[in-house]
Amino acid sequence: MDETADPGPPHVRPEDMRAGDVDREQVLDRLRIAHAEGRLDLDEFDERITSTLAARTYADLRALTVDLPGQPPSPPAATTPPEPGPLQDLDALQERDLRGAVIGWAGASVTTIAIWAMSCIATASFVYPWWIWVAGPWGLVLLSSWVRDRRQ
């Protein structure tokens, strides 16, 4: 037998193993969080990002986050409400859409009424209430939508 046969792959320490793109992305995410938390200033953040992209081994990556806490503190876990069913989810979406539409209508109505009032004051006379043609039809459409949703 030949004693010079291939002894197998050389033993590589875990920290000397090559890092992959996924590993670099995890470090980049941690650095972004640390920067957002105020743990890294902009210059140091930039340096570490550049070093992360150039890192080849796990040891290179570990050196970039060794002085940062593992994960940012998370808020205490709250009890989660039960998952809404499809109909409950649709109702919530319709309510939110209607609420947004009413807020838009109210803002436009208040704005047009204010412009109308200022024109009445500026001319010192009563001006035709043209704002009704803005607020009225839009409000009637919203009201009919609300009534239709309540009947369903």
Image: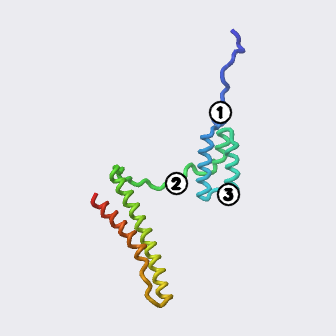
Q: Which residue is identified by label 3?
A: 42
Assign a secondary structure to mark 1.
Answer: loop
Give the number of the mark in front: 1 or 2. 2
The residue type indicated by label 1 comes to Arg
Mark 3 → mark 1, Cα distance in angstroms = 33 Å
User: Could you say which is closer to the camera, residue 106 or residue 9?
Assistant: 106
Image spot of residue 20 (x, y percent):
63, 38
Whether residues under marks 2 and 3 lie with C-beta atoms below 8 angstroms apart, the answer is: no
Mark 1 → mark 2, Cα distance in angstroms = 31 Å
The residue type indicated by label 3 comes to Leu
- Specify which label sits upstream in the sequence, 2 or 3: 3
Q: Residue at x 63, y 43 (%)?
A: 24
Image spot of residue 149 (x, y percent):
31, 60
Q: Which colour scheme appears in the figure?
A: rainbow
Q: Residue at x 38, y 73 (%)?
A: 136
Mark 2 → mark 3, Cα distance in angstroms = 22 Å
Q: Which mark is residue 73?
A: 2
